[in-house]
């Protein structure tokens, strides 16, 4: 029931990922920054240790196109599945039918 941080770091630690700060609004959106995945995991672990609070705010790894990143050689189209609770989302169904992108709504961030 918990992420295997060591495995994720081994596979993707050097990847640069888009991270949104959910505590800040700019033009009806959250500002994003690019962080090394290992820095995001460090933040995530600290966030958990501190009772789901951080002086950096609530950071959310958002819109990381893992399949297109080239980090997984010969990436199959089904590198991940959409959780059942989100599987009826019309946008996920659209992107699945298009088969041109890996953009699906999958949560990858701290709980809380």
Image: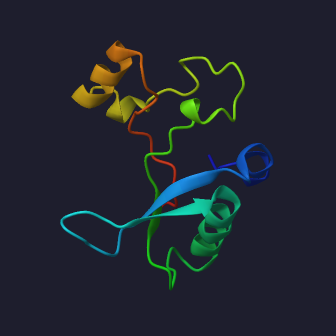
Question: Which is more toward the observer, 26 or 104?
Answer: 26
Left/right placement of residue 5 relative to residue 80 reads right
Extreme residue toward the bottom, this view: 55
User: Is residue 28 in view?
Assistant: yes
Q: As drawn, is 79 to the left or to the right of 81?
A: right
Q: Is residue 13 above or below residue 76?
A: below
Q: Position of residue 19 (x, y in %)?
A: 48, 60
Furthest residue to the left?
A: 28
Q: How many marks?
A: 0
When the figure is inspected, residue 53 is found, relative to residue 27, above or below; the finding is below
Foreground residue, 12 or 54?
A: 12
**Relative to the observer, which residue lies in front, 86 or 15?**
15
Using the image as rendered, state which of residue 110 and residue 75 is in the foreground: 75
Instruction: Give the residue at x 44% y 52%.
Output: 62
Q: Residue at x 62, y 46 (%)?
A: 1
Give coordinates of residue 99: x percent, y percent. Answer: 41, 15
Q: Quadrant of residue 36?
A: bottom right
In the rendered image, the vertical position of residue 36 relative to residue 42, given as above or below = above
Q: How is the image coloured?
A: rainbow
The residue located at (59%, 80%) in the rendering is 50
Q: Residue at x 45, y 46 (%)?
A: 107
Query: Vertical placement of 44 versus 13: above or below?
Result: below
Q: Position of residue 14 (x, y in %)?
A: 73, 53
2 to the left or right of 30: right
Q: Look at the image and tell me whether residue 89 can be seen.
A: no
Determine the image quadrant of residue 32. bottom left
Q: Could you tell me residue 101's position as x and y percent?
A: 43, 26
Q: Is residue 67 left or right of residue 36?
A: left
């Amino acid at each position: 029931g918990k992420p295997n941080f060591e495995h994720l770091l081994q596979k993707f630690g050097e990847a640069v990922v888009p991270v949104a700060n959910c505590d800040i609004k700019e033009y009806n959106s959250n500002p994003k920054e690019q962080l090394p995945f290992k820095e995001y995991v460090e933040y995530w672990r600290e966030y958990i240790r501190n009772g789901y609070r951080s002086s950096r705010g609530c950071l959310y790894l958002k819109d990381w196109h893992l399949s297109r990143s080239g980090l997984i050689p010969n990436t199959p189209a089904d590198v991940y599945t959409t959780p059942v609770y989100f599987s009826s989302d019309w946008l996920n169904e659209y992107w699945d039918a298009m088969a041109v992108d890996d953009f699906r709504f999958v949560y990858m961030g701290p709980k809380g």
